Amino acid sequence: MAYHWEGEPGDTRTITYGWLNDEVRRFANVLRGLGIGKGDTVAIYMGRVPEIIVAMLACAKIGAPHTVIYGGFSEQALSDRINDAKSRVLVTCDGAWLRGKTVNLKDIADLAIEKSPTIEKVVVYKRTQQDVKWVEGRDLWWHDVVADASPQAETEVMDAEDPLFILYTSGSTGKPKGILHTHGGYMVYSSTTLAWVFDLKPDDVYWCAADPGWITGHSYIVYAPLILGVTSLMYEGAPTHPGYDRWWDLVAKYQVSILYCAPTAIRGLMRYGDEWPAKHDMSSLRLLGSVGEPINPEAWRWFYKQVGGERCPIMDTWWQTETGGFMITPMPVTPLKPGSATRPFPGIDIDVVDDEGNSCPPNVDGRLVIKQPWPAMLRTVWGDDDRYIAQYWNAFPEQGWYLAGDSARRDEDGYIWVIGRIDDVIKVSGYRLGTAEVESGLVSHASVAEAAVIGIPDELRGSVIYAYCILVAGQYGSEELADALKDHIRKEIGPIAVPTKIEFVSVLPKTRSGKIMRRVLKARAMGTPEGDTSTLEE
Ligand code: AMP
């Protein structure tokens, strides 16, 4: 069994390795029939259905780099990525289920293609059965072309350094970067890290609850688990549909033993209270994992206690789209400290350095650098080698170190604490504060479910902090509560971290992968242009 699959409406499928093998071969033949071969890019814009995996692997089989665009992106984001990758074929779905409604993927794709003239053919997988517009000669139904294709297909012989995929990620500028990964190193590193960090056993049911459309999904839903022969769970929809316990229900139903997800999801579910996980028998769980941003100790403890029953170590994995696999991470035997991703993976040479490149002493903030190459490192920014060099290699050109773009500190035990992106560090009266630190402080107050803070320029102090808080269900914002939160931060972190202004909001601007877009909050607070907001979820 490769995947237990469950749709949001509750329909289920059983995906075996044998079925995948057949479907991948058939779809490889479909792509070849459309004139796609080694080196041609294929754009994939689908929901969380098993066929997204088939499409990715069929590309890998014929040596055509895939570029998966997350199914929640808007037409502009989709079109920009297709244009940058110059794809001739787009694989999509009629629609996808999300929160009880359908996302009209094909309609969005149609609009995107109007601005993406390279697209010649569109293959459409039927998921929601909704009506779609049809362009004769361009559009093809997946079920028709796959049924007609042979299940025998030669695998293209590739060099280890040939491109496997391009995955777009947001950088410090508005234009997305196409991160390029290759066949050999990526496969070796993603599978080795998964095997060691999640200690996979033949009877495990492993659930990476990310989306295949971002790096966590590429590495740890698709490539690494399939290389290792793992049985995974894949779930199509929202964690809170139809009830706040959908995830916990899935854990119990499929006897999930390893759950790997993002802090934003944990905080989102924590909001609704302890009773939801408590309704389900989650004793099958033995390991938990977290990825995507620093996990605040409050969420860590809730995850550990309410989900893991104080039994399951949490693998807090620090890595990036660019790194392809876990870089700083515990293993199940590592003593944990809530909020720290602990130590580098064996063989990974990571340091925290000051602006001159000197290693920082314990507990002093610095820049996170990677000093030696590793198998799954990005090879370039697609079509833009100059940007690749400027972005990642120019900070310490003499030493040849990779700049991760994060600030971090190492404690006296050698544990690394990632503070956040370098651009998310706020200097207040000369003191450095991580947005994540202040946010974690706010969330540790019983009334706050989620928080985002930004630095606003201030003549006297350099910057002051503005905070935006989402309250737990049943709480309402007031002057008194704002004062109480300021007091709380004063106690938690110190007077320097107290926000000048606290605003209560019902949503925060987030990327599809759940990261808060602080630059949008900042632009709004300062009345400056918001820049590209086409990739925002909310
Ligand atoms: P992405 O490429 O979208 O996965 O984003 C990578 C960035 O997410 C890193 O540079 C970090 O800022 C952040 N990140 C990912 N995982 C962690 C983690 N476990 N702890 C702290 N930050 C993380």
Image (cartoon, helix red, strand yellow):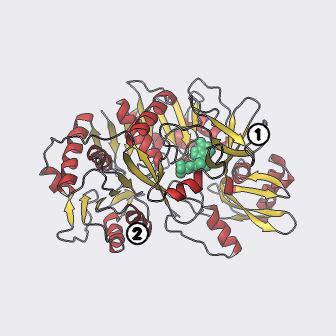
Residue beneath label 1, please? 360
Residue 229 seen in the current view: yes
Q: Is 342 drawn above or below residue 483 in the view shown? A: above
- Mark 1 and mark 2 lie on one chain; the one further toward the N terminus is 2
Name the residue nearer the viewer: 480 or 406.
406
Q: Which mark is residue 266?
A: none
Residue at 49 percent of width and 27 percent of height: 196
Displayed quadrant of residue 418: top right
Would you call the spot at circle 2 few (<14 residues within 10 Å), some (14-19), or many (20 or more)? many
Q: Is 81 drawn above or below residue 143 in the view shown? A: below
- Describe the element under mark 1 as helix, strand or loop: loop
Kind of residue at disc 1? Cys
Kind of residue at disc 2? Glu
- Describe the element under mark 2 as helix, strand or loop: helix
Q: Is residue 2 left or right of residue 500?
A: left
Q: Is residue 483 left or right of residue 529?
A: right
Q: Is mark 2 within 8 Å of ligand 1?
A: no
The picture places residue 379, in percent across and down from the top left corner, at 47, 47
Name the residue nearer the viewer: 188 or 505.
188
Residue beneath label 2, please? 75
Q: Is 145 drawn above or below residue 538 in the view shown? A: above
Residue at 44 percent of width and 50 percent of height: 180
Would you call the spot at circle 1 few (<14 residues within 10 Å), some (14-19), or many (20 or more)? some
